[in-house]
Amino acid sequence: MKLKWIIFLIFLLNIFFHAEEIIGQGGEFIVIPFSDSVNSEYDEQAPVMTPDGGKIYFTRAKHPENIGGRKDPGDIWFSEMDEQGRWSTPRNPGEPLNNSQYNAITGIDGKSFYLTGHYIPGDKKPKTRGLSVSYESQGQWSFPEPLDIQYYSNLSDHQSACLSYDGNIMVHSMESYNGRGAEDLYVSFKKPDGSWTDVKNLGTIINTRYQEKTPFLAADNQTLIFSSNGHGGEGSMDLFMSRREDDTWNNWSAPVNLGRVINTNGRELYYFVLPGSDEAIFCSTLNSDGYGDIKHYQLKPEDIIEALEVTMMAEDTSIQEFITEKDVLVLKGKVFNAETNEPIEAGISVLLSNESTVAEISTDIQTGEYQIEFASKNNFIIRIGARGFMNVEDNIQLSDSDQPLILKNYYLEPLEVGKTFKLNNVLFNRATATLVDTAYAELDNVFRMMSDNPEIHIELSGHTDNQGNARKNLELSQARVDVVKDYLVSHGIQEERISGKGYGGTRPITSNRTEETRRLNRRVEFKVIQTGSQ
């Protein structure tokens, strides 16, 4: 049973990377430019292939033949394969797929082309963000129509997505509600009427405080490959793989790096492979003619074990270390400064749900690394704290006790004057100042931070949406601030270290047009107003 996870990865890689023809020696990954005719001195990105593998669409930026010329952030281009397997010189299909905005294809479902962004007749800049769909007939495309995705709201300039092979699931990269920081990965599902459900955050195993971008969902609708700068790696953006473990879309295996042969000190993005294909394609900025090139690679079946050992697991962790004693877990990773991405020394505690501590350790002062081994097959809590940083608490839900290794990197935000921290889980019963039960864990985390950093002074701020009477909203937000302050003071924090004010609905962080976005405006935050360095 302990080998189940490894066997799955062997099976998965055998499907993805099996190749009949191998270039080179020594059984290595073969990573080469996709085609000299496709790659150029300009920036190639976002490749998507038609289901028959005979045509590749991609985005090319800053090209003089783009609709917007050299200033155009990206037009869709395409190349076709001839009978000899050679790729044609790429062509720009022009309007309506392209305009002077950024254009890219996120997926192809039959004759339906899913596109990033909204399109306005006359090439006007759209006032809304989202995705669109165009229908192809005999090489002609209809004018792109907005895709109906409930409550879609992207606060980032970046937008990427992946359509599942069956056309019913879309994984998005965007900055939206319930996010952890920058771009997160979300999922939405196609409804019978052709519209799409609200986007759902994939959770804290996949998403970090940094960027998760360019998702790819394999044909099994369970295996996810994405680019991130929040899970460590070889360069600024690396490709990672994770497997969905149930139907909640929140429980995933720990993301594993695809390895240093694929990932470099450049940026690796936009992974894509067709079912049954003998190669995968992706974009990389390493040794490219311009900003980025499309590359592909192949792998011998007999090299699967070596690939798992060298590239899929931790750098110094062999497969034998995965075959541990029954019910023993290995928790391993690094702790970083979220602002500088430098390793920091931190204390880590592992607790069971009853608050009993099962392990404590400090990270390496030079590398930020930690490794904890303990016997458990239950869910547990990890607490990470460092002097001068906001604590992090992570709830680990074990869905498969036969997986003995959990790889987790953590990023702690420095406690700097003027920095604001949102208390996402400090919630109240509707229209009252009564805390819900789940709020206390996060308040306890704030209490521990202030106890560990006695020089820190904070200012609480309470916020509501704009519904109802403005004066009552102001009073309610102040009452909620007072409740939070009273809780911290009652646990031993000096009252003079905490100030606070309610702002009612005067400081929204997003629109108040829907209940989903109004919920984001109902929040409690604290700002650091004094540290020991002052």
Image (spheres, rainbow, N blue to C red):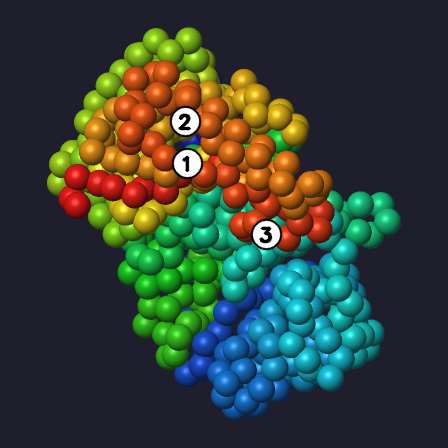
Of 134 and 257, which appears nearest the observer?
Answer: 134
Residue placed farthest to the left in the image?
366
Cα separation between marks 1 and 3: 22 Å
Q: Earlier along the polypeptide chain: callout 1 or callout 3? A: 1
Q: Residues within 10 Å of mark 1 (few under 14, many from 20)?
A: some
Amino acid at pointer 2: Lys
Q: Secondary structure at mark 3?
A: loop
Of 349 and 97, which appears nearest the observer?
Answer: 349
Amino acid at pointer 1: Gly
Residues under numbered marks 2 and 1 in contact, where contact means CB atoms less than 8 Å apart: yes
Name which residue lies at 67% across and 53% down: 152
Residue placed farthest to the right in the image?
193
Disc 1 designates what residue?
500
Q: Is residue 91 left or right of residue 328?
A: right
Q: Nearer the viewer, mark 2 or mark 3?
A: 2
Disc 2 designates what residue?
485
The relative height of residue 387 versus residue 280 in the rendered view (above or below) is above
Q: Is residue 422 visible?
A: yes
Disc 3 designates what residue?
510
